[in-house]
Image (spheres, rainbow, N blue to C red):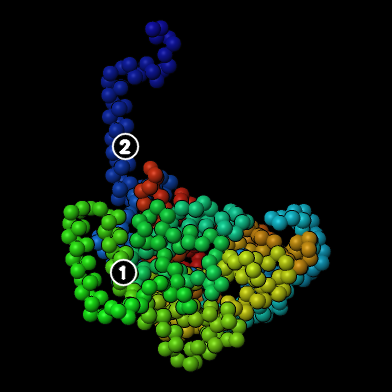
Amino acid sequence: MNPFNISNNGRNLLNRRKFLGQTGGVFGSLGLISLLGQQNLLGASGEAKTPIRPKINPEEPYSARRGHYQGKAKQVLVVYCPGAVSHVDTFDYKPDLYKFHGKKPPGIPAVTFEGPTGNIAKPFWDFKPRGKSGKMVSELVPHLGEMADDLCFIHSMTTKTSAHPQGENFFNTGSTFEGFPSRGAWISYALGTENQNLPAFVAINDPRGRPRSGKNNWGSGFLPAAYQGTDFSANTLPSNLKLPKSITNKSEKKTNDILKFLNEKHLEKFPGDTDLAARIASYELAGKMQMSIPEVSNIDAEPEYIIDEYGANSSNKTKSAYARNCILARRLLEQGVRVVELYNGANTPNGINNWDSHNNIKDTHQQQADIMDQPTAALIRDMKRRGMLDDVLVVWCTEFGRMPFLQANGTGRDHNPNSFTCFLAGAGVKKGYSYGSSDAWGFNCAEKPVEIFDFNATILHLLGLDHERLSYYHNGLEQRLTVVHGHVIEDVLA
């Protein structure tokens, strides 16, 4: 070999003393970095956080567990509005829409999600200041407007998709694809629940049916099946709760005791089989629910003033049923259920069933708001009155917003993933506060954009969970709700 064809670095490696010295230095550095990383002592530029997986007894997968640190919230209520609520007609007041109403100024795209665009349209409902904060909220949601001083608005939400199924997936699972764990599954996996007679995670469907992505919104994905949400509503309880008339309570208890004994003996033969343990725990929970669900779902036991306040006696049957779902949500949270998700909108073929308003937005949004506004506001007010907001984080959200201009049909607004509004309330967040902003028309984010990953990271943070460390090893990767993204929105924290 010609020594002149070797680089200077290569010549140095041929020197035994230099080779050993450099190799020793490299391995020493790697060892030091590993030790510092394990103790979280690396600088911000090279911070490496080790995963934290909850210590779970497979025989008791729902038992309450500690978070990574003391969170401000112990439980979470999510009110999800499928179909995309128009932010410019509800909570995001834009005076320039009145100024440019009926015009098509430069900067408006020629085509959006569903076709050609029309002119700028002012809000279909008047806005007015609410509460001591003076927050501008439209007459479409007057009851929530009355709660403005208790709400923390985020006006700079943005998402990566403008299709409803993918939008629901992305908001609730962190991925546009199916098969990923839902936010509620991650939380129940990490924290379990305080009430062992009820599920850790309950999804309450709209009276008209399920949202577009259905069970994926509360599924467990690649997490153990024990952490998927249990879906039922005030009017559609889990099946087979009542005993047949031919079986007495005493006989049922003896049968359950025998099954428990046999299951425990069977489990002893397969120690460490988490699937078997989870299956047994699931059946045992189902048995406990035969006693707990009828009691917690007894809405008729509520005082008359609660029924009136929520609107559960409304002549609008859908509103009445949704109001009963809101009461059920409060009762579940009172019993210690960790995560309750309440859906206002469904994917059914006939009629107006969600917030999707490509045509006649004045009528379609009004019909949806008539169902959602009073019961949702009453739920928040009722929990505040009972002191529940000290421990419960309330999340109101939708998959994206709607455009400030009309579609070519002149009556509806198209999907807007570039900017929309959600709000938080309760444990750990500021009251009467607005974060971020959209531009003058509500078209794009203007200040402090918030991605879905940031939003979910903040929810986990308020529950005492570090979104960068809550992970599950799957398919060769440390998977997490926020993937490799997300920052906690520090400014909204109380």
* Secondary structure beneath label 2: helix
Q: Position of residue 221 (x, y in %)?
A: 42, 55
Q: Residue furthest top?
A: 2
Q: Which residue is drawn at 63% across and 61% down?
A: 419
Find disc 2 in the rendering and name its residue: 30
- Sort mark 1 into few (<14), some (14-19) or many (20+) by Cα contacts within 10 Å: some
Query: Considering depth in this image, is 397 or 151 the residue closer to the camera?
Result: 397
Would residue 280 be visible to someone looking at this image? yes
Residue lying at 43% horizontally and 46% vertically, measured from the top left: 45
Residue, disc 1? 285
In the rendering, at what x and y percent does residue 12 appear?
35, 19
Residue at 44%, 68% in the rendered image? 231
Q: Residue at (32%, 80%) from the top-left corner? A: 245
Cα separation, mark 1 vs mark 2, equals 48 Å
Q: Quadrant of the N terminus?
A: top left
Task: Decide: is 486 above or below 289.
Answer: above
Q: Which image quadrant is residue 139 in? A: bottom right
Within-10-Å neighbours for mark 2: few <14, some 14–19, many 20+: few
Q: In this view, does 474 lie to the left or right of 379?
A: left
Q: Which residue lies furthest to the right in this view?
A: 103
